[in-house]
Image (cartoon, rainbow, N blue to C red):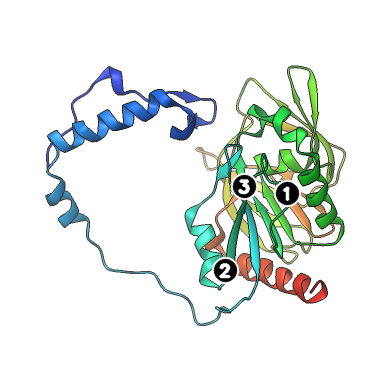
């Protein structure tokens, strides 16, 4: 097949949560172009493609509703863009229309029956995010009206009261009373599971969620938590803690959930969105 020779000038720049996004780093963009050329010169791409062909194993189970006539608004911009592609596809399999919105440039949400705000780097853009008062107010009003809303990690920070950067506090949506603060060291890292303590937009009480946590921030709050969390460590011992927050039909936590790990999660969220739509035609 070939090999890629080691070259120092194609190392990609990074930050505390991993690689910088190609869209925000012109230097990385040039490096990617150079890597592409190196691969073409050193790898037998056709043979690689021939070997990588696999059968189509995708399927839609018979026990899910494939015809949900609902719309899910997904935050997609430079602050919020960490999503499992499979998770979005789980909604699309059920007929859900995905409508994207931008937390910087959109003054209000698109027409939707539910909201999904993923992870990202809101701490880098806290000042800009706080300036979009009209969108913040729209999201808060939707939460008060019981629209199903789910946010994870960076999304949790956005739905909190404030993000504090270098002792300056920037106001966010305020759905959850708390302050997000950055920390010099990693707070959580790796795969973990969550047991739901209540009925939420995604779960019934007792349901299990699987995903990962990876964050350099803490959310300071006196709110009750919605999940019992646990993670198996390298020595097979189990670490436990509580996390996640629930207000009306809004759920937020540091856990990045993989929706395909439990079909009931997506089904529950879709049904909650449908119920909201029927009550708010």
From the viewer's perspective, is 112 left or right of 161?
A: left
Q: Are the residues at dot 2 and dot 3 in contact (C-beta closer than 8 Å)?
A: no
Q: Are the residues at dot 1 and dot 3 in contact (C-beta closer than 8 Å)?
A: no
Quickly name the residue at label 1: 252
For residue 206, which quarter of the picture?
Answer: bottom right
Tell me which numbered mark, 2 or 1, is placed earlier along the sequence: 1
Q: Which quadrant, please, contains the C terminus? A: bottom right
Instruction: Report the Cα–Cα distance between label 1 and label 3.
Output: 10 Å
- Note whether 131 is above or below 87 in the view shown: above
How busy is the neighbourhood of tag 2: few (under 14 within 10 Å), some, or many (20 plus)? some
Q: Which mark is residue 221?
A: none
Residue at image point 22% right, 23% down: 6
Tell me which numbered mark, 2 or 3, is placed earlier along the sequence: 3
Please state which of the two labelled residues, at mark 2 or mark 3, is closer to the viewer: 3
Count of numbered labels shown in the rendering: 3
For residue 98, which quarter of the picture?
Answer: bottom right
Q: Position of residue 88 (x, y in %)?
A: 53, 59
Query: Looking at this view, is 112 or 258 the one in front?
Result: 112
Quickly name the residue at label 3: 118
Residue at image point 64% right, 30% down: 187
From the viewer's perspective, is 87 left or right of 265?
A: left
Q: Position of residue 177 (x, y in %)?
A: 86, 40
How busy is the neighbourhood of tag 1: few (under 14 within 10 Å), some, or many (20 plus)? many
Quickly name the residue at label 2: 263
Element marked by disc 3: loop
Residue at image point 63% right, 71% down: 267
From the viewer's perspective, is 221 left or right of 88?
A: right
Instruction: Report the Cα–Cα distance between label 2 and label 1.
Output: 19 Å
């Amino acid at each position: 097949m070939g090999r890629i020779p080691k070259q120092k000038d194609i190392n990609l720049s990074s930050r505390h949560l991993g690689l910088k996004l190609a869209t925000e780093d012109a230097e990385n963009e040039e490096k990617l172009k150079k890597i592409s050329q190196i691969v073409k010169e050193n790898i037998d791409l056709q043979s690689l493609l021939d070997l990588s062909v696999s059968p189509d194993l995708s399927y839609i189970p018979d026990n899910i509703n494939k015809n949900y006539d609902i719309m899910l608004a997904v935050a997609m911009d430079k602050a919020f863009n960490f999503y499992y592609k499979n998770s979005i596809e789980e909604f699309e399999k059920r007929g859900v229309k995905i409508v994207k919105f931008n937390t910087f440039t959109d003054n209000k949400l698109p027409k939707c029956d539910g909201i999904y705000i993923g992870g990202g780097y809101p701490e880098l853009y806290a000042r800009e995010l706080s300036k979009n008062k009209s969108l913040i107010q729209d999201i808060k009003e939707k939460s008060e009206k019981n629209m199903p809303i789910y946010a994870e990690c960076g999304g949790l920070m956005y739905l909190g009261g404030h993000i504090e950067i270098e002792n300056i506090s920037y106001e966010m949506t305020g759905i959850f009373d708390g302050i997000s603060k950055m920390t010099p060291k990693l707070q959580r890292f790796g795969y973990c599971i969550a047991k739901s303590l209540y009925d939420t937009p995604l779960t019934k009480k007792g349901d299990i969620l699987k995903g990962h946590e990876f964050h350099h921030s803490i959310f300071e709050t006196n709110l009750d938590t919605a999940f019992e969390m646990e993670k198996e460590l390298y020595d097979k011992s189990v670490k436990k803690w509580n996390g996640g927050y629930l207000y009306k039909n809004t759920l937020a936590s540091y856990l990045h959930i993989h929706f395909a790990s439990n079909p009931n999660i997506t089904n529950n969220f879709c049904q909650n969105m449908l119920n909201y739509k029927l009550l708010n035609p």
